[in-house]
Amino acid sequence: MSVDKFDVIVVGGGPAGSAAAYTLAKAGVKVAVVERGERCGCKNMTGGRLYGHSLKRLIPDYEQRAPLERRITKERVSFVTRRGATSLEFSCRGLGGKQAASYSVVRAKFDDWLAREAEAQGAFYINGIRVDDLVVRNGKVCGIAAGEDSLEADVVILADGANSLLGQKLGLVKPLQPKEFAVGAKEVIRLGRGTIEERFSLSGGEGCAWMFVGEPTGGGMGGGFLYTNEDSVAVGIVATVSDVGYSGKSVAGLLDDFVSSPLIAPLIEGGELCEYSAHLVPEGGLKMMPQLYGHGVMLCGDAAAMVMNLGYVVRGMDLAIESGRLAAETYIELAARHDFRPEALRLYRKKLESSFVLREMRRHRGAPKAFASRGVFTRLPVLAEDVMKAMFTVDGVNTSGLPVKVLAAAKKYGFGQLARDMLRLLTSV
Amino acid sequence: MRIEDKLGKTRFKVREESHIRLAPGVPERRRAEKLCLACPAGLYSLDGDGRLLFSHLGCLECGTCRLLGWNRELEAWDYPVCDFGVQYRNS
Ligand SMILES: Cc1cc2nc3c(=O)[nH]c(=O)nc-3n(C[C@H](O)[C@H](O)[C@H](O)COP(=O)(O)OP(=O)(O)OC[C@H]3O[C@@H](n4cnc5c(N)ncnc54)[C@H](O)[C@@H]3O)c2cc1C
Ligand code: SF4
């Protein structure tokens, strides 16, 4: 690295970092992105689905330019027990309309593309370098250090992801707590385009997103997911780290059982595993959100715990992109005054407050607690199964009406517990 | 499919030196078992004397073990230097 001075250094070339770099470079700001991966995206994985609204604000014609896998038009949610599943399916051609479409993505392709878009605006990417430390002088973050080298800037934007070692070193991010994180593991299985469309009843270019509650995590907190890519299927689980071991099974074992379960196995039959990956997800919501700025520094995306998991919707990439853009705008507004003290950078928080990022995180702040209730993962799938069994079993013996059968199922769950779980779920999600 | 075979499908740029170092001594049993279950690459195991065994080859750099064991079972955890380590192409 040379001793050039940049206006802004961004650590991390994921969606948050590249959205910041894109916005800054477009406004003529001298910005460098330092990313440890040889190419942006090669260190990253996700479940699979990008809600496109915030990217659209950044790059209005992204749908014509970005490497998107499939447009999601089919949603499935399944409550899974050992014996089977109760599922809800919703399909809608053109779901999300023109402004709010969502797409499955593969991060190695997507992140690399976004980095190149930022580069085309004038951002400077330094790949294959792990940032070891921040340069701090008189309490102000002045740059970054990697090995023997250092690089200075007015402001550093930390977009270094869920396990933000730099945010922790700086003291902005508190030591990570196992109950606030989930570990996600997934398999990508190549099946071919036609087979996917056949097995999931999809038309060309359309895709399916599928969430699973219950058995995929052995009743432990978390869930399973499946996304269809263009010619592959991503199947994975996320398990709350503090709850690992609840079922006695390992994370790798749970995923293995899930992909070989009767629910999934026939769908991926004959496919070829092409990658196995894992990553942390910050799931503590608003409560775990760190201080978002300091003297000369702002935190974006996963580093700032900007993830929302509502069970049927998992979002992090759209929040990452929006927060990156807003951090960049904050810098652009403050640059003329050259004031990057915390009092000035508070503007970043204000921008987040009036954006969907903090508004929605606030609205759903109860979700982490609702999902910390065991009943959702153990009893709810069984309740759904009992109700469905009551509806669809005809034996000439049990002659009571459906309401009685439903009540019996609810009693098994526990009326009080059921009411509490439902209330928490409904008010938070 | 065994986890070793699954990891064989993922590409790595291997560095001999580990970016994760175990603390010496015998860990608390329950905590050690949790590390073994949680690592999605299955890189932790326990030997007959209740000591942790670990190999960094196949590490997906997820940080789960750091979250569980930093400053106790683990005495060092960092991302691999430069661009070493996992190289995803399809995730
Ligand atoms: C299993 C799973 C499923 C998910 N499903 C979804 C989903 O369906 N939809 C959705 O919207 N979100 C989903 N998410 C969340 C989403 O993936 C994240 O919110 C998003 O990737 C955050 O982007 P980011 O730019 O903040 O961080 P990241 O994408 O993690 O980027 C951080 C970057 O910083 C780099 N870096 C880190 N430390 C250093 C350092 N010291 N020096 C240099 N570079 C460094 C990394 O290499 C990386 O490129 C999921 C996450 C997981 C794990
Ligand atoms: S970082 Fe993740 S994959 Fe690597 S050893 Fe720790 S838990 Fe296992």
Image (tube, rainbow, N blue to C red):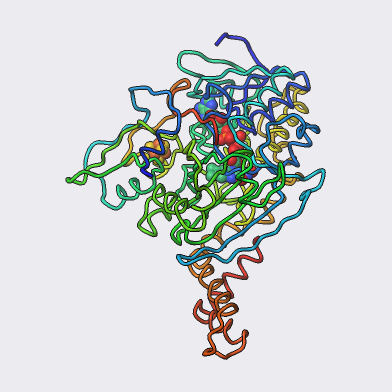
Instruction: Please say if A415 is above or below A147.
Output: below
Q: Quadrant of ligand 2?
A: top left
**Which residue is rendered at x = 46% and y = 13% of the image?**
A148
**Which residue is rendered at x = 59% and y = 87% of the image?**
A404
Q: In which quadrant of the rendered view does residue A402 lie?
A: bottom right
Q: Does A8 sit left or right of B55 as displayed? A: right
Q: Nearer the viewer, residue A259 or B27?
A: A259
Q: Nearer the viewer, residue A352 or B12?
A: B12
Image coords of residue A166 (percent x, y): 51, 31
Q: Nearer the viewer, residue A177 or A121?
A: A121
Instruction: Please say if A380 is above or below A350.
Output: below
- Is residue A315 visible in the rendered image? The answer is yes
Labels in figure, total: 0
Q: Does A91 sit left or right of A308 as displayed? A: right
Q: Work out which quarter of the rendered image holds the N terminus of chain A and state it.
A: top right
Image coords of residue A426 (percent x, y): 65, 66
**Which residue is rendered at x = 71% and y = 38% of the image?**
A322
Image coords of residue B76 (percent x, y): 35, 32
Instruction: Please say if A68 is above or below A185.
Output: above
Instruction: Please say if A80 is above or below B80.
Output: below
Instruction: Specify the farthest residue to the left.
Output: B49
Q: Work out which quarter of the rendered image holds the C terminus of chain A and state it.
A: bottom right
Q: Does A205 sit left or right of A392 as displayed? A: right
- Is residue A306 visible in the rendered image? The answer is no
Image coords of residue B71 (percent x, y): 35, 39
Q: Nearer the viewer, residue A232 or A428?
A: A232
